[in-house]
Image (spheres, rainbow, N blue to C red):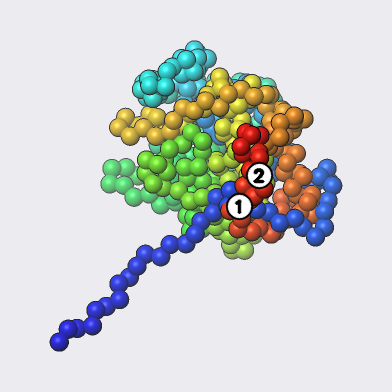
């Protein structure tokens, strides 16, 4: 007699959505775009536009940081990169831009083996502050304990601690990891932490006392973590889940910790969808790397090249389209949505009747996989 076979436990999957699979439903009431308020607040700082720069060497140097701050956004400069390793970063950036596609990864790996110089970290912060700009610095967790005090002493305003995947609890046999609750006590500046993509990880990070969370694993144009490691959640779902964590934390504590959707943006419509999904701000990389003022010389590359055995991220050619101001505010003569991103956000908010970013969070969204192709056959065949 055969015994009854137990039913197997099967892993259950849920559908996750990216920018191209959803659409925003216009509201019943509309609003003039110039009546929208898109202020973004982190800690005691308020910014006129809810846009941060990706902390990547191809996007931000001292001059770009100063310009971005003057335009109302929050520049984040990478202090684990070229700006903190070389006295003459422009020469190094030229070398990267001129490298052939077959040799660039090896060149990047070699460039990032140069040790970080603590004096340069302080010098870059002071140069940005001297110009009257807000200075946000990005560090990887392994360097944060050593370099964060230098950033603070030099007058840094905001600290971003970033890695491919960040959690509130890290297990290691070899060292005591970075404890965010302790860091918040030691460093008297708002701390933004990333990156994560889930409700539980986001909520745990907020409970450590940080001031903001970056959302996204592997969506960036120059990032290959999804291909190399298989990690990630499409940005709409990651943002919705993390927004739920933010709202739960607010119910628990009365403290509102903003979430910042980081990466995967191509056009203004993607930016608008991120806010409808629950983002308080967006972090842009390849979009801004196309600016004439960007240090990448028309190129953009990921920040995981330094790994000696498993380099991730790739240099891509984004070209140089126009000025940073035109990318953010227009006017634009192109029809594909890569410029006047702030104008696109205000217009979408107006069509949804949302006067503020928090009201935009309530905009209805639908699953719409045909949203980018429906009726667009001529545009696609003619390359418009």
Q: The N terminus lies in which quarter of the figure?
A: bottom left
Q: Residue at x 40, y 29 (%)?
A: 305
User: Hey, which quadrant is residue 143 in on the image?
Assistant: top left
In front of the other: 41 or 103: 103
Q: Is residue 197 or residue 88 the one in the foreground?
A: 197
Please count the marks in the image: 2
The answer to whether 287 appears left or right of 310 in the picture is right
Q: Is residue 183 visible?
A: no
Q: Distance from label 2 to label 1 (Cα)? A: 10 Å
Query: Circle 1 sits on which residue?
Result: 370
Q: Are marks 2 and 1 in contact (CB under 8 Å)?
A: no
- In the rendered image, the quadrant that contains the C terminus is top right
Query: Residue 112 appears at what percent x and percent y?
Result: 40, 24
Nearer the observer, disc 2 or disc 1?
2
- Marked residue nearer the N-terminal end (2 or 1): 1
Q: In the rendering, which numbered label is found on residue 376?
A: 2
What x and y, as percent, mark residue 129?
64, 25
Near mark 1 (Cα within 10 A), the count class, few <14, some 14-19 or many ≥20, is: few
Q: Is residue 288 above or below residue 220?
A: above
> Which quarter of the figure has residue 189?
top right
Q: Residue at x 72, y 28 (%)?
A: 326
Q: Identify the residue shown where x is 37% and y is 20%.
A: 103
Mark 1 lies on a secondary structure that is loop
Point out residue 55 in the picture as x, y percentages from the top left corner: 54, 32
Which image quarter: residue 101?
top left
What residue do we see at 30% from left, 76% from top? 7
| Secondary structure category for the residue under label 2 | loop
Q: Nearer the viewer, residue 249 or 306?
A: 306
Q: Which mark is residue 146?
A: none
Q: Residue furthest left?
A: 1
Of residues 198 and 204, the one drawn nearer to the viewer in this rendering = 198
């Amino acid at each position: 007699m055969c015994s009854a076979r137990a039913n197997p436990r099967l892993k259950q999957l849920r559908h996750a959505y990216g920018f191209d699979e959803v659409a925003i439903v216009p509201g019943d009431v509309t609003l003039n775009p110039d009546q929208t308020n898109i202020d973004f607040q982190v800690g005691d700082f308020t910014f006129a536009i809810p846009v941060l720069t990706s902390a990547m060497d191809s996007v931000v140097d001292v001059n770009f940081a100063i310009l971005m701050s003057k335009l109302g956004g929050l520049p984040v400069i990478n202090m684990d990169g070229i700006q903190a390793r070389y006295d003459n970063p422009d020469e190094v950036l030229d070398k990267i831009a001129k490298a052939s596609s077959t040799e660039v990864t090896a060149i990047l790996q070699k460039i990032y083996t140069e040790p970080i110089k603590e004096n340069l970290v302080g010098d870059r912060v002071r140069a940005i502050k001297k110009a009257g700009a807000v200075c946000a610095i990005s560090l990887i967790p392994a360097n944060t304990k050593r370099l964060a005090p230098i950033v603070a002493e030099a007058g840094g305003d905001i600290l971003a601690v970033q890695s491919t995947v960040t959690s509130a609890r890290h297990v290691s046999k070899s060292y005591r990891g970075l404890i965010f609750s302790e860091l918040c006590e030691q460093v008297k500046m708002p701390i933004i932490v990333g990156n994560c993509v889930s409700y539980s990880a986001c909520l745990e990070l907020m409970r450590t006392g940080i001031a903001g969370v970056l959302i996204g694993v592997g969506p960036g144009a120059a990032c290959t973590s999804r291909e190399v490691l298989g990690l990630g959640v499409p940005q709409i779902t990651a943002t919705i889940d993390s927004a739920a964590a933010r709202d739960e934390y607010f119910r628990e504590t009365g403290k509102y910790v903003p979430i910042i959707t980081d990466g995967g943006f191509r056009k203004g419509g993607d930016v608008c969808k991120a806010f409808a999904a629950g983002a308080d701000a967006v972090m842009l990389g390849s979009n801004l790397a196309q600016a004439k003022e960007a240090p990448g010389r028309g190129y953009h590359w990921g920040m995981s090249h330094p790994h000696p055995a498993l380099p991730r991220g790739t240099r891509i050619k984004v070209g140089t389209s126009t000025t940073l101001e035109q990318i953010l505010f227009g006017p634009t003569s192109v029809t594909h949505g890569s410029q006047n991103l702030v104008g696109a956000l205000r217009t979408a908010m107006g069509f949804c009747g949302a006067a503020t970013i928090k009201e935009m969070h309530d905009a209805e969204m639908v699953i719409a996989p045909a949203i980018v192709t429906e009726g667009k056959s001529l545009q696609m065949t003619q390359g418009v």
